[in-house]
Image: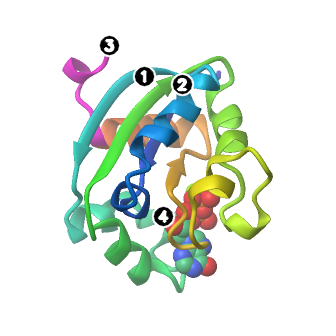
Amino acid sequence: MATNRTFTMVKPDAVEKNNIGPILSMINQAGFKVIGMKYTRLTKEQAGAFYAVHSERPFYGELVDYMSSGPIVAAILEKENAVADFRKLIGATDPSQAEEGTIRKAYAESKAKNAVHGSDSDENAAIEGNFFFSMLERF
Ligand code: IDP
Ligand code: MG
């Protein structure tokens, strides 16, 4: 059953370029409600654990270094059909393939440094939200 929730991060490249505000604005304008939010920085170990599913991929080391390179904004978002609608809003992993009007088209600089994360399933949305947020941090 769909949970109507997804998980996102504004990644270090977008934070560094002062794009937190514009990205959150696009997220709100698309109808997503913030359930939990925090500004934090992952250690290498935490980034490695978060992306453990990609540990066999050739870009894993680069991904872990990048995601621990600076602060991020993590958030749980709510909307009907949240996971699929949010993946549509962020656009393709590679910004050169991302559609006009998507967050990655507007703010990603490369396939690696692509501005935002979005969960790919309801199951992963729950796992990823639980990675960052306790029950006392959800509203
Ligand atoms: P997604 O974020 O669109 O779901 P995934 O395939 O799940 O894309 O990859 C996770 C993250 O790993 C991407 O968002 C990006 O930051 C990074 N990544 C994916 N493919 C590459 C690559 O070919 N080179 C470098 N980094 C990559
Ligand atoms: Mg993914």
Q: Label 1 sits on what residue type?
A: Val
Residue identified by numbered label 2? 28
| Residue behind label 2 places its C-beta within 8 angstroms of ligand 1 | no
Q: Please report the residue visible at 55 percent of the width from the left and 63 percent of the height from the top.
A: 114
Residue 134 belongs to magenta span = yes
Cα distance in 3D space between marks 4 and 1: 26 Å
Q: Please report the residue visible at 41 percent of the width from the left and 64 percent of the height from the top.
A: 13
Instruction: Characterize the local packing of mark 2: few (<14), some (14-19) or many (20 or more) Cα atoms within 10 angstroms.
Output: few
Q: In the structure shown, which secondary structural element does the residue marked by tag 3 occupy?
A: loop
Identify whether 34 is placed above or below 41.
Answer: above
Image quadrant in which you'd find residue 48: bottom left
Cα distance in 3D space between marks 3 and 2: 16 Å
Residue span colored magenta? 132-139
Q: Earlier in the sequence, mark 1 or mark 3?
A: 1
Q: Nearer the viewer, residue 42 or 29?
A: 29
| Residue behind label 4 places its C-beta within 8 angstroms of ligand 1 | yes
Residue identified by numbered label 1? 34
Horizontal arrangement in the rendering, residue 64 relative to residue 44 (left or right): right
Residue 138 percent location from the top left of the image = 30, 19
**Residue at the limit of the structure toward the bottom, as seen here:** 58
Q: Please report the residue visible at 43 percent of the width from the left and 74 percent of the height from the top.
A: 63
Q: Label 4 sits on what residue type?
A: Val
Cα distance in 3D space between marks 2 and 4: 29 Å
Q: Label 3 sits on what residue type?
A: Phe
Q: Earlier in the sequence, mark 2 or mark 4?
A: 2
Residue identified by numbered label 3? 139
Q: Earlier in the sequence, mark 4 or mark 3?
A: 4
| CB under 8 Å between discs 3 and 2 | no
